[in-house]
Image (cartoon, rainbow, N blue to C red):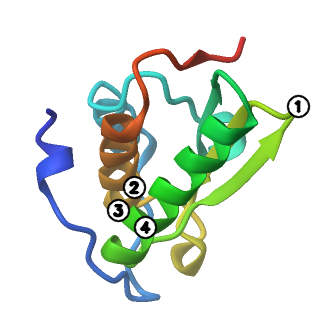
Amino acid sequence: MTALANRQCVPCRGDTPPLRPEEAQAMMQQVPGWSTPEGKLTRDIKLKDFKEALALVNRIGDLAEQEGHHPDIAIHSWNHVRIELYTHSIKGLSENDFILAAKINQLLPPESHEVP
């Protein structure tokens, strides 16, 4: 478990600055499997089947509600889940994005794998 996964998301105020690129890069080490295309924290996961993909989306949804921080989630190609984290209120990445990514990593079934 990473240190980030032990933390709780806190509401961002509109005047909170987004993470600087070097801060975000340092946090990337604690969220394996994630990347930052287009400035969003993103992960693509392939699961066994649609039922497993839907179950993962529901687990992520429950976690997001608990944390008060909500990702964009899509199921595509019947067994692929794409998760994007981005703090809209500050128009960039925040610590909350990385905290939620670390917690999402803990929800992934062992047989899931990255989509190339």
Residue 98 in picture, x, y percent from top left: 36, 48
Q: Which sits in the foreground, 73 or 12? A: 73
- Indicate the secondary structure of the residue bearing disc 2: loop
Q: What distance separates the C-alpha of mark 1 from that of mark 2? A: 33 Å
First along the sequence among labels 2 and 4: 2
Return the residue at label 4.
62
Return the residue at label 1.
77
Left or right, residue 13 beside residue 71: left
Q: What distance separates the C-alpha of mark 4 from that of mark 3? A: 16 Å
Quadrant of the frame with the C terminus: top right
- Indicate the secondary structure of the residue bearing disc 1: loop
Return the residue at label 2.
19
Q: Residue at x 48, y 56 (%)?
A: 60
First along the sequence among labels 3 and 1: 1
Residue 10 in picture, x, y percent from top left: 26, 77
First along the sequence among labels 4 and 3: 4
Q: What distance separates the C-alpha of mark 2 from that of mark 3? A: 10 Å
Return the residue at label 3.
96
Q: Residues within 10 Å of mark 3 (few under 14, many from 20)?
A: many
Residue 97 in picture, x, y percent from top left: 42, 56
